[in-house]
Image (cartoon, helix red, strand yellow):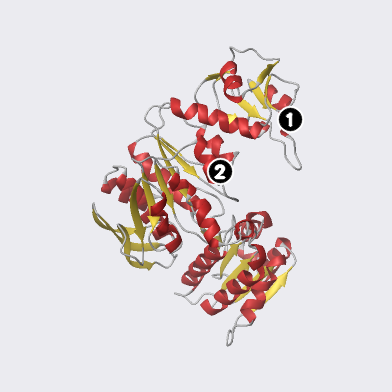
Amino acid sequence: MIRLTLAEIAGATGGRLHNADADQIVTSTVVVDSRLAEPGSLFVCVPGDHVDGHDFARAASDAGAVVALAQREVDAAAVIVDDTVVALGQLAALVLPRLRDCHVVGVTGSSGKTSTKDLLGEVYARRGPAVAPIGSFNNEVGFPLTVLRCDQTTRTLVSEYGARGRGHIAYLCTIARPSTALVLNVGAAHLGEFGSREAIAEAKGELVEALPADGAAVLNADDPLVRAMRSRTAAAVVTFGIDSDADVRVTDLTEDDLARPRFTLRTPAGDATLQLRLHGRHQAANAAAVAAAALHDGIPFGDVVGALENATARSAHRMAVIERPDGLVVIDDAYNANPESTRAAVDALVRLSAPQRRRSWAVLGEMRELGDDARQLHLDVGSYAATAGVDEIVAIGAAAPIAAGATAVSGWSGRARVVDDPAAATEVVLDETRSRDVVLVKASNSIQAWSVAEALVAATSAEVGA
């Protein structure tokens, strides 16, 4: 965090001081959770539907916070502003230009953003301190919090740009304008808000429109909607892909018994065979995207390859593969879900199950924000899972059409059922799974299906079915 006086904070946000000394200095982190407040920090009072941060300003102050950013007077030193979320963005926009030699790398896409930003953090750290988002800090609160973690030593800021409507990414770019921008794909995530994939592409393309002329747009050549974004930027364009003749290509793609990709990475700087430690075939494309960006930005080829091969999952509940002592394998990919990422997770499940003919389970919750196409998209996922050969499908609550889609597949010998909630799903898998089964858990985060995965990991072989 760059040191800021309360006068500077008030000036940047158009705020007024309340019970505060203009010369006091914020020397530590910026937080929106009072439990994370520490001496020298700034606490942002974010009003929510169920919890209002203003009610915790005193607790943050008692923990050492120098000041609260608030929309009304509180029982603590404060800078009073009209909107604390907007003010948070204004603070981040104030700090970023003060950083010496900090390169902003941005990533967006319907799926894969979080895994890719983790890889970007690993690779760009090879040339100096890098700051990347924690979890999925990609909205108007989490995004500026990531920016505000930077200090004068930061060489690279990795930013994840999320969107639930047109203009969202453009707004985030006013806080941190990228010099290098990766667009991974355009899928069905948030189809309910946007209405069509074309509308999603229009919003995602705001990232490349924000690039300076001397920047770089790193585009997925396998996705026509992403490839077309080259017309929306004056920056250099670098492409990556698997099926296409891209600048950075993945060829000879295979997976090991734990669904970890092995492939040849072909680049203008040279070719190399990589074995990733991450799980899922789709990680190869993410790695190619990161390599394309890093090589354009001057990171040596050997450093790029070494960082990609050594990278492990940093974010919870994203393609985490855990093997219990009795051999049962849990694939915890329950942080988020859309049709594309769910099919990729099913592919990983089948790949993990196939070599030793293990029984495969797909515990699938609702994929939210899909709009009017939600039922059909859930049916399609069920059909895909059954066709792929998944043995047991457990659909949670509103994901019931997944079970219907599976049972409609002619000749499928597996079983599909519907349960009310994650607790019921947990009861089923604890009771019926056996040693050496493979269980995938996948759903939108708000379903909290990760509780099923956690229960399975915590269970011993004596607690599950024989």
Please, is residue 383 above or below residue 452 in the view?
Answer: below
Q: Residue at x 41, y 46 (%)?
A: 181
Q: Position of residue 36 (x, y in %)?
A: 63, 32
Q: Looking at this rendering, what residue extends furthest in the bottom direction?
A: 411
Q: Residue at x 70, y 61 (%)?
A: 422
- Going by the numbered disc 1, the residue's amino acid type is His
Q: Is residue 332 left or right of residue 424?
A: left
Please, is residue 128 above or below residue 411 in the view?
Answer: above
- Disc number for residue 137: 2
| Residue denoted by label 1 | 54
- Going by the numbered disc 2, the residue's amino acid type is Phe
* Image quadrant in which you'd find residue 220: bottom left
Q: Residue at x 49, y 27 (%)?
A: 95
**Towards the viewer: 330 or 138:** 138
**Towards the viewer: 268 or 325:** 268
Element type at marker 2? loop
